[in-house]
DNA sequence: TCGGATAAACTACACCGGGTAGTTTCTAAG
DNA sequence: CTTAGAAACTACCCGGTGTAGTTTATCCGA
């Protein structure tokens, strides 16, 4: 019987499998990826893969959730680094936008799986999709909103709806690049990332710039 | 020999095939879609499909380009309707945003194929991808920029870079919904579309509102 | 205007090669 | 005795081709 959910078997093998699954699913997408390829990438027999995960779909969804949580954590660290102790608001907002774009879209790593999920959205069970959103994009948005709230209390931003501000910041500084690079599938020049982030922050500050930021 | 490029065979059959291909590719995605399913959907034998299109990839790319051009034309009409003779700027910008979102994301139709392309971007020949972008998103952006330019000359908008304004308008009024619905894969309540468009336009006018729009 | 000949296009169906998910069997090692 | 590895096996589906027969459009002669 496959130990689909709980931790079973050698943990390091399981880790190797999930890591390999992220790589292969991210590179090939769900449909194209084969269990043989994942087993090979993990340096493990296919039997072992099926000992840890019931089937292809279970493996994919499991890895997707894990990846989503990891990325959220990484972004959370970036926020702590750039938005906790703000001195130069505009510069810090630009730096965070750039680093986030790099973290999500830089070749292969975290964003690739997100692309696979977006491609498969119609075939993902609603509750799993919900969980993925909650652990990923929604969580990041909440974190960002909390930071904006704090900045607003310091008078650096003028926001009545921090959630809305977080969304608009993300749209203006990130989604343009994400769309242009097709969520990391195509490379984007780093100067382009910086340029878009800068322009986006300026626009954002026009909307939500606080008293201290208004000319 | 397959008559891949030129018009050959019965035109109505060819039309039925491209139409069916749009439906099936849009619903299943490139990899999952089978040529059998497309032939069945078209009410045509599989051999006929291969008489009109050399192979699956050719059919997909051909249909993608056609679809892209059609959608661009549809959006162009919406711009003509809402942005040619503007009287109430804010209302017209909202109306256009809502109608565009409906046109692109409404269940199944035009946006579905775009999703398939975004999923396959890594496997699409660069020159074809370029052509798709040029006939689709880039063309629409240019059209919108031209309209903004005209509005700026009337003093309704304050834009120095109309292209940038067009992008920001699109981000603020459209991409939020597109991302939330995964480009039409999941349904979105119409009130939500209207709400996001309205909020987006207000933000946009904070950035680029012209003299006549400033309080 | 009509009726059949002709050629192109289409259909139905079997078929091939290749690839995949998932299972099983057997073997080795800790 | 438990766990994993290797590899073969099953059952299936897909892209694409070959073929033989059928439909459809076009044209030509009376």
Image (cartoon, coloured by chain):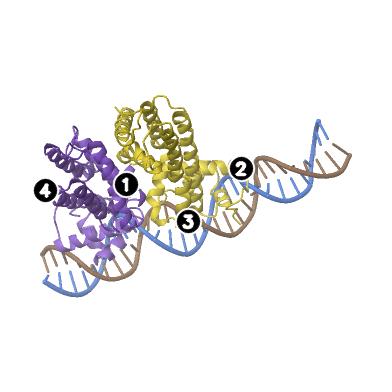
Chain colours: A purple, B yellow, C blue, D brown
Q: Secondary structure at mark 2?
A: helix
Q: Which residue is mark 2?
A: B11
Q: Quadrant of the C terminus of chain A?
A: top left
Q: CA distance from mark 1 to mark 2?
A: 35 Å
Of the image marks 4 and 1, the number of the one nearer the N terminus? 4
Task: Please name the residue that numbered disc 4 is placed on.
Answer: A85
Q: Nearer the viewer, mark 2 or mark 3?
A: 3
Where is residue C4 shown, x and y percent of the image? 79, 42
> Badge 1, how many Cα within 10 Å: few under 14, some, many 20+?
many
- In front: C24, or A49? A49
Residues beneath discs 4 and 2 located on the same chain? no
- For mark 3, give the secondary structure: helix
- Could you tell me which chain the residue with mark 1 belongs to? A
**Between tags 1 and 3, which lies in front?**
3
Please tell me if label 3 and label 4 are on a single chain. no
Is A199 situated left or right of C19 in this image? left
Farthest residue, direction front: A215
Q: Is residue B133 above or below residue B90?
A: below
Q: CA distance from mark 1 to mark 3?
A: 24 Å
Tag 1 secondary structure = helix
Q: Is residue A126 visible?
A: no
Chain where mark 4 sits: A
The tag on residue A118 is 1
**Rendering coords of residue D9 (x, y %):** 35, 64
């Amino acid at each position: 019987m496959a130990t689909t959910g709980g931790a079973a078997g050698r943990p390091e093998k399981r880790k190797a499998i999930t890591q390999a699954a992220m790589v292969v699913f991210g590179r090939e997408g769900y449909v194209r990826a084969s269990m043989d390829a994942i087993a090979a990438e993990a340096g493990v027999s296919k039997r072992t893969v099926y000992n840890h995960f019931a089937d292809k779909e279970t493996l994919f969804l499991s890895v997707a959730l894990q990846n989503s949580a990891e990325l959220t954590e990484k972004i959370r660290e970036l926020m702590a680094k750039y938005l906790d102790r703000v001195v130069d608001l505009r510069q810090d907002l630009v730096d965070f936008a750039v680093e986030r774009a790099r973290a999500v879209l830089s070749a292969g790593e975290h964003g690739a799986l997100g692309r696979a999920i977006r491609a498969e959205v119609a075939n993902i069970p609603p509750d799993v999709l919900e969980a993925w959103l909650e652990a990923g994009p929604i969580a990041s948005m909440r974190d960002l909103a909390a930071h904006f709230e704090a900045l607003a209390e310091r008078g650096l931003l003028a926001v009545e709806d921090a959630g809305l501000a977080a969304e608009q910041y993300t749209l203006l500084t990130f989604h343009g690049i994400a769309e242009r690079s097709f969520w990391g599938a195509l490379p984007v020049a780093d100067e382009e990332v910086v340029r878009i982030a800068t322009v986006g922050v300026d626009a954002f500050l026009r909307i939500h710039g606080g008293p201290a930021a208004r000319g």
